[in-house]
Image (cartoon, rainbow, N blue to C red):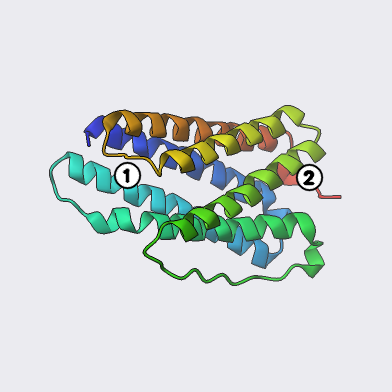
Amino acid sequence: MSVPMALMDMVPVVLFFLASLSLMHDLYHMMSKGAFALFAAGVILVSVAGFYKALWKMLYALNVCDFEALNRSFFPMQSTGFILAGIGMAGLLFFRQSERTAAMAAVPVYSSAMPFVMLTLIGTFCIWGALAVIAKRMRQSKTAVLFLFSFVCMLGMGYLSSRDFTEPLMNWIGQSVNLLGTGTFLIGARTLHKAGLDRFEMA
């Protein structure tokens, strides 16, 4: 673990949070209170999970302490955040605003990471897929492709996270893919904003 790696780990967290802020602002007028609350809570939880893991790496790299609890909380928090945000985005796509209702999601804690990986995949698919659909409906085909590319990067990051991250090379590869995925996510969100997402209405 090194300080440059810990700093690089923080960059995708910041990019994801900035993209999420842009989307929360632009999608608010289209979502019911329940759907928006789920989406906002989800993306904030994902951001906090990422910050916790980056903070754990930084504390370890600086020889302050090995705060393992920050690392162990990453998967449960991230997967819960993605599924909550995914439910909110699914509500935006498949239900008219007057028919939307809030949903409650409870995620049990298991020692295996697989349930969290599956929840993350489902939530990620709902979020990125919904954004690609919205971009397509706004006639922003290139942005839709950008979201799909970002989704592939997120899938790649999910695969790489199952590898041995004690190896510095795997760490750099994983964080490079993560940076690419969150970077294109932010570009896509800002492109939709400039195209008028905050005024767009779903048909």
Mark 2: which amino acid?
Phe
Q: Nearer the viewer, residue 56 or 24?
A: 56
Residue 45 seen by the camera = no
Secondary structure state at the residue bearing disc 1: helix
Looking at the picture, does residue 105 appear above or below residue 130?
Answer: below
Query: Residue visible at 31% across and 39% down?
Result: 165
- How far across and down, in percent of the image, does residue 28 sit? 67, 54
Q: Quadrant of residue 138?
A: top right
Query: Residue visible at 74% across and 38% down?
Result: 135
Query: Residue visible at 15% across and 50% down?
Result: 65
Q: Quadrant of residue 149?
A: top right
Q: Are the residues flagged by discs 1 and 2 in contact, CB closer than 8 Å?
A: no
Looking at the picture, does residue 104 appear above or below residue 163?
Answer: below
Q: Nearer the viewer, residue 127 or 197?
A: 127
Q: Quadrant of residue 123?
A: bottom right
Sequence-first disc among 1 and 2: 1
User: Which residue is denoted by mark 1 in the rendering?
Assistant: 54
User: Which residue is denoted by mark 2 in the rendering?
Assistant: 200
Mark 1: which amino acid?
Ala
Residue 68 seen by the camera = yes
- How far across and down, in percent of the image, does residue 181 sit? 52, 34
- How far across and down, in percent of the image, does residue 143 sit? 69, 31
Query: Residue visible at 46% across and 71% down?
Result: 108
Q: Which residue ends up furthest to the left in the rendered image?
A: 63
- How far across and down, in percent of the image, does residue 15 sit? 48, 37
Q: Is residue 157 left or right of residue 172?
A: right
